[in-house]
Image (spheres, rainbow, N blue to C red):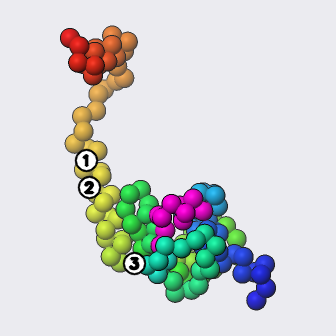
Amino acid sequence: MTDESAANRRLDKWLWHARFYKTRGAATAAVDGGKVRVNGDRPKPSRRVAVGDHIEVTLAGIVAEFEVLGLPERRGPAPEARTHYRETDASAVRRAAFRENARLAAASRPRPDARPDKRDRRRLLRLHRGQS
């Protein structure tokens, strides 16, 4: 195996190819920021990824767990990218419950029919400042 083919096996590149992040820089920042774990360890962006590794990624405030099934050679379309990993059953259930709770919380918040006009905005500002 040459270094050129092994370069695609870096963790930051794998996360980008598998479409967890829009840019490789964002993937690198996530790994450096502690939002990614490989086999329970906090890795560096240059860590090599192998088939069978377990990756935990913090996405939108919840930890999602994936098993590496393949090492993509390119950043292809999403259906192709999904063939290179599998989400664990516990993670899928946890993320579904989180999404449902977020949906219910959003539904319970009051929604105005229209945006506030200038007069209403001034009233809201006075209310927030504690003035009458």
Magenta span covers which residues? 28-37
Residue drawn at point x = 28 percent, y = 15 percent: 126
Would residue 92 be counted in the magenta stretch?
A: no
Question: Dividing the picture into quarters, in which one does residue 4 lie?
Answer: bottom right
34 or 123, which is in the foreground?
Answer: 34
79 or 126, which is in the foreground?
Answer: 126
| Whether residue 129 can be seen here | yes
Q: Residues within 10 Å of mark 1 (few under 14, many from 20)?
A: few
Residue drawn at point x = 24 percent, y = 34 percent: 110
Q: Which residue is mark 2?
A: 101
Query: Disc 3 marks which amino acid?
Result: Thr
Q: Which mark is residue 116?
A: none
Mark 3 secondary-structure assignment: loop
Residue drawn at point x = 29 percent, y = 28 percent: 112
Q: Which quadrant is the N terminus positioned in?
A: bottom right
Extreme-bottom residue of the structure: 1
Between the C-alphas of marks 3 and 1, the distance is 26 Å
Residue drawn at point x = 66 percent, y = 78 percent: 9
Q: Residues within 10 Å of mark 3 (few under 14, many from 20)?
A: few
Q: Could you tell me if the residues under marks 3 and 1 are in contact, i.e. CB atoms within 8 Å?
A: no
| Image spot of residue 6 (x, y percent) | 72, 81
Q: Which residue is mark 1?
A: 105
| Image spot of residue 62 (x, y percent) | 37, 62
